[in-house]
Image (cartoon, rainbow, N blue to C red):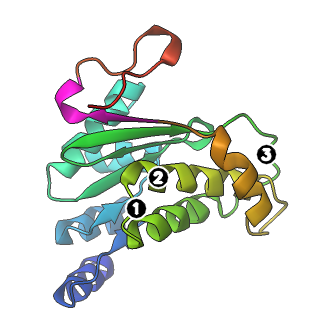
């Protein structure tokens, strides 16, 4: 059960940023080592926090609560509704266009790959989320276990709706019509 805790702790000893994508007791134990980023889906976050997350506001609060435990970036994936990512200073909402799903295999891993790539190059979280959702969405366009295609990712990138909101404005969230306030 402590394997992810041990891996994260060892990596941090070498100043390596870690991304933890797990579930259940492995996620619960792994986050005790404070990985740089975690990416549970809504169900996994509910299990971890022992509470339901029925609304977008509840998901945002959950992500911010997990950040308060010492995890730098928390990304909660919401399937066809995209992702919510949070840090101490802001949260990002990234939503894909509606597409015909062929297979969901590998979508979460593709999402993580997009996050890791942009963050490793020092890109802003909002751009990491944009690429992550484009890659995850591109993955569902392919059959079976086939990886996402670069052409699909490039086609999807401009179609990803992304908002960045300062955590100082968490009371305003997303007003009617799903139009988010602009970032500070």
State the CA–CA distance, disc 1 to disc 2. Answer: 7 Å
Side of 180 where 112 appears, left or right: right
- Name the residue carrying label 2: 127
Part of the protein shown in magenta? 163-170
- Name the residue carrying label 3: 101
- Name the residue carrying label 1: 123
State the CA–CA distance, disc 1 to disc 3. Answer: 29 Å
Question: Which is closer to the viewer, label 1 or label 3?
Answer: 1
Question: Residue 116 in the image: x percent, y percent?
Answer: 45, 68
Instruction: Decide which of 53, 8 is in the foreground and name it.
Output: 8
Question: Residue 113 in the image: x percent, y percent?
Answer: 54, 68
Label 1 neighbour load within 10 Å: few <14, some 14-19, many 20+: few
Vertical position of residue 21 compared to residue 168: above or below: below
Q: Secondary structure at mark 3?
A: loop
State the CA–CA distance, disc 2 to disc 3. Answer: 24 Å
Q: Write the residue at 32% across / 78% down.
A: 4
Using the rendered image of the protein, determine whether residue 19 is visible from the camera's viewpoint.
Answer: yes
Q: Secondary structure at mark 1?
A: loop
Image quadrant where one finds the N terminus: bottom left
Vertical position of residue 43 compared to residue 165: above or below: below
Q: Secondary structure at mark 2?
A: helix
Question: Residue 108 in the image: x percent, y percent?
Answer: 57, 59
Q: Are marks 1 and 2 in contact (CB under 8 Å)?
A: yes
Q: Write the residue at 33% across / 29% down.
A: 58
Residue 171 appears in which quarter of the rendering? top left
Side of 122 where 90 appears, left or right: left
Instruction: Decide which of 4, 168 is in the foreground and name it.
Output: 168
């Amino acid at each position: 059960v402590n394997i992810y805790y041990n891996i994260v702790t060892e990596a941090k000893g070498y100043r390596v940023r870690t991304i933890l994508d797990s579930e259940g007791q492995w996620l619960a134990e792994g986050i005790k080592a404070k990985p740089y980023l975690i990416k549970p889906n809504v169900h996994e976050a509910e299990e971890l926090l022992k509470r339901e997350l029925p609304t977008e506001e509840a998901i945002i609060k959950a992500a911010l609560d997990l950040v308060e435990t010492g995890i730098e970036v928390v990304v909660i994936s919401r399937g066809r509704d995209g992702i919510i990512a949070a840090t101490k200073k802001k949260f990002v909402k990234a939503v894909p266009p509606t597409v015909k799903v062929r297979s969901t295999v590998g979508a979460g891993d593709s999402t993580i790959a997009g996050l890791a790539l942009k963050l490793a190059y020092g890109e802003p979280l909002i751009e990491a989320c944009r690429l992550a959702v484009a890659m995850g969405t591109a993955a569902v366009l392919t059959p079976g276990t086939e990886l996402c295609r670069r052409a699909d990712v490039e086609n999807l990138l401009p179609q990803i709706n992304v908002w960045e909101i300062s955590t100082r404005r968490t009371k305003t969230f997303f007003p009617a019509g799903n139009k988010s306030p602009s970032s500070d």
